[in-house]
C-alpha cells in the first residue's frame, strides 16, 4: 500500500475542498451546499450542447465502406457543424477523428446497437515498433499498442458529436473467469482495451453505447492546460475495471453505467471510475441523474465505485503537489447493490476522505428485492407458475422514476419485463379540478338540479350530468396510471410513492408493487346515486390501487391512505357525505392469483373489495386472494369484503377505532358465493366479536387461532349460520401464532425501502 500525502500538503491542496462527514469512511457524502457547486451547467460552463438536426449532411457511410476513408475524403471544414450519417451495420477497424472541424457522426438505426463501430486491440498486443498503434495514437517505437493505442475510436479534436452509435472493443470478449486471455494479457495487466478515447473540448455523446471490459472509456485532455469538456447523456457505458477514466471534465447525465460480469477470475473485484484530475482542477467526473447497475452474475458489494488514477506516479509514490488527485462525484443516481465504497488509488495510496476527492450525494440503492419473484408458498400468487413481475428485466429496462414524465416514458415499454425504481413521491394530479372541469359543469348547479327534493330518486341525466361525466373522463385520463404486464414497481427511498391519483392493473399479469406510499385517489367530480341505499350516496370513481381482470399480482410492504383530504372532512350534500375516495385496494372482474402482504392501511372507509357485484357470476372460479401480515388502522370496513372468491386471511393485525372519524362497521365481509378462511389474525380495539364479521349473503367462513384483545373470539357462536370452508390453500404458508404475528406486523408492515 502507498503512503498518505503529508498533512501540510493535504491542507494546502484541499482545505477549501473538504468533503462533508461520511456515513462510512469509504463512502463519503458531500453536503448540500458543496454539491450545489457540482452541476451539469457548472461543469459545461459556456458550452451549451445541441442537436445535429438541421446541420448539412456531407457524407453517408454504408456497410462495406471504411468510415476512416470517408472521413479522410471530406473537404476542408468551413468552421460550421457538418454531419456524417452511418447506416445500420458493423464497421470494423480503428477510427481517428482529427482535423475535421465541427462534426457529428450520426447513426441511422433505431437504437445505438444498430450502428456498431468495433475493433479488438489491447494494451499488451505486440506490434512492430515502426507500425502505428492507432491512426490518432501512433506509439511509434513501442513494441506494444499501449492503452491509448488500443482505442477503437479516438476523438483528437474539439467540437464532435456522436449520436446513436455503439462503440466497442471486443479484445477481451473471449476471456471468461480469468481464463482465455490473448497473449500478454491477464489478470495482472495488459488487458486494457479502450473503446473510445477523447482528447478534446466540447465533445458530446448522446444515445451512444460504449462496450468494453477494462478501460472502456478514456476521457483525456489534449494538453494539461487545455479545456476538455465531455458530455455523455442518455447513453450506456459498460465495463468491469477502471472503465471510465482520465483527466477530462466529464459529465455523465441520464445514462446507464453497467458493471459487466464474467471476464475476471472468481473473487476478483471490479472498479468503476478512475479520474486523474489535476490537483488545481476543481471539476473532474460528475455522474448525475443516472443508473449504475450490473449484469447478472456480478456479486453484491463486489465492485468499487472507483479510485483515483495517480497518472505518472509509481506504485508507492512519491506524491507531490503536482500529482493528480482524481475528482468524482456520483449524485442523485440509482446504484445497484453490487457497488461498494471507493478504494485505494492506482499507485496504492489508501483511500482517505480527507485527502481524496471522491464522494456521493443523494443516491439511492436498488435493493435485491427489485429483482425478487414472490417466494414459493407465499399465497395464491405463488401458485400456477408464480409471480415474477419484472424480475427478468435487462439492465437497460431497470429505470429510475423521479417524475411523472419518467413514469410515462417507462410505461411505453409495454409488456417488456421492467423494474421501475421510484425515487420520489410523485403527484399524479398537480393541476387540480379546474384543469379537468368541463366548461358546462357547475357543481352548485349540479346540486340544485339533482336535489332529491326537486329531481326525486331518478338517476341523474341531462346536460349537467353529461358535463360531469366529461369532466370525470378528463380527470381519469390524467390521473389514472395503467401498469402493463411484467412490471415490478418498487420504492427505493423513504416516502417514495404516488399521491392524488390511481394505479390501475387492467387485464394484465405478472405485476409486483412494493415499498410504496399510495395516497389520496381523490375524485373531483363524484357521482350522486339516489338509488344507492335507502337515502342515496355520493360515489367516487377511483381506487388507490385497482385490479381488474389482473392475474399473478403481488402487493407488498405498501402504505395506503387518503392523505390530507379524508372524506370525513368533506361536505354533507343531500344529507350524505360527499365521498371523494373509493377503495384503497380493490380486486374485481375475474382478477385472480393475488397475494397482498405486509401492507399498512389507515383512516379510510371502504378499504378492500374482492368481487364487485353479486351479478358478476363470471367471477366464480377466480378472485383467489391471500392477505397476510397486513395492518388495518382506523378503517371502517371491507378488510376485505368478498364475493365469489376463495380468500385466505391470515396473520393480519386489525386496529378498529370506533371513535375515529371513520368509525367502525366490520372487518371481514362474507359476501355472495364467497369462501373465506381466517387464520391467526389479531384484533386490538374496543369492539365485540359480533362486529368482526358481516354476513352479506355469504355462507362459508372458517376461523382458526385468531385473537380479539388477546382472547379467542367465538366466531362460530357469533355467526352460527356460517358453514366451514371446504377448500385448503394449495401452498405451504403456515400461520404463526396471532400474538407473535401482531407484534411483527406492527414493526414491519408498510414500506421498508
Image (cartoon, grey):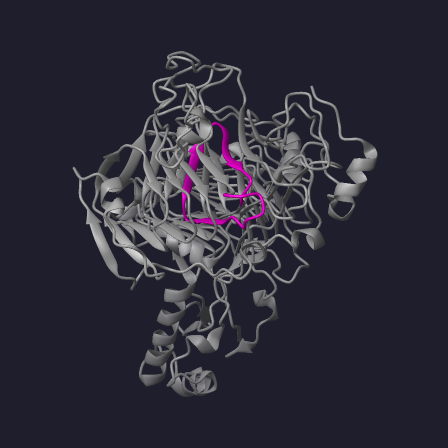
What residue do we see at 65% from left, 34% from top?
Answer: 744
Residue 213 locus on image (x, y percent): 43, 27
Is there any visible trace of residue 352 in the rendered image? yes
On screen, residue 397 above or below 187 = below
Q: Which of the image's four quarters has the C terminus?
A: top right
Q: Which segment is the magenta one?
A: 222-248
Residue 283 locus on image (x, y percent): 61, 48
On screen, residue 189 above or below 55 = above
What residue do we see at 46% from left, 23% from top?
Answer: 732
On screen, residue 179 above or below 12 = above
534 or 751: which is nearer to us?
751
Residue 7 locus on image (x, y percent): 82, 33
Left-right relation of 114 to 345: left
207 or 473: which is nearer to us?
207
Residue 567 locus on image (x, y percent): 56, 66
Q: Which of the image's four quarters has the N terminus?
A: top right
Q: Image quadrant of residue 9?
A: top right
607 or 558: which is nearer to us?
558
Amino acid at each position: 500500500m502507498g503512503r498518505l500525502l503529508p498533512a501540510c500538503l493535504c491542507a494546502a491542496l484541499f482545505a477549501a475542498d473538504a468533503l462533508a462527514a461520511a456515513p462510512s469512511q469509504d463512502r463519503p457524502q458531500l453536503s448540500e451546499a458543496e454539491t450545489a457547486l457540482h452541476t451539469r451547467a457548472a461543469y459545461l460552463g459556456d458550452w451549451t450542447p445541441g442537436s445535429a438536426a438541421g446541420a448539412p449532411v456531407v457524407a453517408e457511410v454504408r456497410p462495406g465502406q471504411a468510415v476512416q476513408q470517408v472521413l479522410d475524403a471530406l473537404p476542408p471544414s468551413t468552421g460550421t457543424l457538418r454531419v456524417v450519417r452511418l447506416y445500420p451495420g458493423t464497421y470494423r477497424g480503428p477510427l481517428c477523428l482529427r482535423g475535421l472541424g465541427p462534426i457529428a457522426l450520426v447513426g441511422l438505426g433505431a437504437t445505438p446497437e444498430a450502428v456498431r463501430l468495433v475493433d479488438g486491440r489491447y494494451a499488451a498486443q505486440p506490434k512492430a515498433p515502426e507500425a502505428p498503434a492507432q491512426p490518432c495514437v501512433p506509439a511509434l517505437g513501442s513494441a506494444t499498442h499501449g492503452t491509448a493505442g488500443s482505442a477503437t475510436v479516438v476523438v483528437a479534436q474539439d467540437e464532435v458529436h456522436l449520436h446513436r452509435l455503439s462503440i466497442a472493443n471486443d479484445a477481451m470478449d473471449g476471456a471468461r473467469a480469468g481464463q482465455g486471455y490473448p497473449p500478454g494479457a491477464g489478470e495482472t495487466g495488459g488487458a486494457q482495451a479502450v473503446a473510445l478515447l477523447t482528447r478534446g473540448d466540447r465533445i458530446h455523446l448522446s444515445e451512444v453505447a460504449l462496450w468494453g471490459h477494462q478501460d472502456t472509456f478514456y476521457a483525456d485532455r489534449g494538453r494539461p492546460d487545455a479545456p476538455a469538456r465531455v458530455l455523455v447523456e442518455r447513453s450506456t457505458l459498460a465495463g468491469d475495471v477502471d472503465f471510465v477514466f482520465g483527466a477530462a471534465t466529464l459529465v455523465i447525465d441520464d445514462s446507464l453505467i453497467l458493471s459487466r460480469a464474467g471476464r475476471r477470475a472468481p473473487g476478483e473485484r471490479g472498479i468503476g471510475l478512475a479520474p486523474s484530475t489535476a490537483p488545481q482542477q476543481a471539476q473532474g467526473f460528475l455522474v448525475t441523474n443516472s443508473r449504475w447497475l450490473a449484469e447478472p452474475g456480478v456479486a453484491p458489494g463486489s465492485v468499487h465505485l472507483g479510485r483515483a488514477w495517480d497518472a505518472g506516479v509509481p506504485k508507492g509514490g512519491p506524491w507531490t503537489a503536482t500529482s493528480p488527485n482524481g475528482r468524482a462525484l456520483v449524485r442523485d443516481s440509482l446504484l445497484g447493490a453490487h457497488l461498494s465504497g471507493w478504494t485505494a488509488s492506482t499507485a496504492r495510496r489508501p483511500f482517505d476522505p480527507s485527502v481524496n476527492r471522491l464522494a456521493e450525494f443523494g443516491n439511492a440503492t436498488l435493493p435485491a428485492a427489485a429483482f425478487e419473484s414472490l417466494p414459493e408458498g407465499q399465497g395464491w400468487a405463488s401458485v400456477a407458475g408464480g409471480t415474477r413481475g419484472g424480475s427478468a428485466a435487462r439492465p437497460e429496462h431497470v429505470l429510475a422514476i423521479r417524475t411523472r414524465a419518467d413514469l410515462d416514458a417507462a410505461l411505453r415499454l409495454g409488456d417488456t419485463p421492467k423494474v421501475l425504481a421510484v425515487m420520489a413521491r410523485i403527484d399524479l394530479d398537480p393541476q387540480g379540478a379546474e384543469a379537468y372541469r368541463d366548461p358546462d359543469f357547475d357543481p352548485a348547479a349540479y346540486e340544485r338540479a339533482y336535489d332529491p327534493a326537486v329531481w326525486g330518486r331518478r338517476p341523474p341525466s341531462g346536460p349537467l350530468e353529461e358535463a360531469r361525466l366529461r369532466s370525470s373522463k378528463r380527470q381519469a385520463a390524467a390521473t389514472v396510471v395503467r401498469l402493463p404486464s411484467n412490471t415490478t414497481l418498487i420504492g427505493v427511498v423513504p416516502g417514495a410513492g404516488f399521491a392524488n391519483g390511481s394505479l390501475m392493473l387492467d387485464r394484465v399479469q405478472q405485476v409486483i408493487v412494493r415499498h410504496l406510499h399510495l395516497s389520496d385517489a381523490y375524485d373531483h367530480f363524484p357521482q350522486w346515486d339516489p338509488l344507492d341505499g335507502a337515502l342515496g350516496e355520493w360515489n367516487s370513481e377511483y381506487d388507490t390501487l385497482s385490479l381488474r381482470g389482473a392475474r399473478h399480482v403481488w402487493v407488498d410492504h405498501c402504505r395506503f391512505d387518503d392523505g390530507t383530504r379524508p372524506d370525513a372532512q368533506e361536505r354533507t350534500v343531500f344529507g350524505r357525505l360527499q365521498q371523494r375516495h373509493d377503495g384503497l385496494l380493490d380486486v374485481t372482474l375475474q382478477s385472480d392469483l393475488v397475494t397482498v402482504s405486509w401492507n399498512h392501511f389507515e383512516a379510510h372507509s371502504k378499504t378492500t373489495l374482492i368481487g364487485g357485484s353479486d351479478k358478476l357470476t363470471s367471477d366464480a372460479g377466480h378472485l383467489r386472494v391471500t392477505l397476510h401480515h397486513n395492518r388495518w388502522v382506523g378503517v371502517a370496513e371491507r378488510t376485505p369484503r368478498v364475493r365469489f372468491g376463495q380468500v385466505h386471511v391470515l396473520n393480519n393485525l386489525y386496529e378498529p377505532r370506533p371513535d375515529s372519524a371513520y368509525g367502525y362497521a366490520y372487518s371481514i365481509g362474507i359476501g355472495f358465493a364467497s369462501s373465506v378462511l381466517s387464520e391467526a389474525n389479531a384484533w386490538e380495539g374496543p369492539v365485540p366479536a359480533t362486529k368482526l364479521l358481516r354476513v352479506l349473503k355469504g355462507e362459508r367462513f372458517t376461523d382458526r387461532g385468531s385473537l380479539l384483545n388477546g382472547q379467542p373470539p367465538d366466531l362460530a357462536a357469533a355467526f352460527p349460520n356460517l358453514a366451514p370452508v371446504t377448500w385448503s390453500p394449495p401452498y405451504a404458508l403456515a400461520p404463526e401464532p396471532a400474538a407473535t404475528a401482531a407484534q411483527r406486523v406492527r414493526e414491519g408492515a408498510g414500506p421498508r425501502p
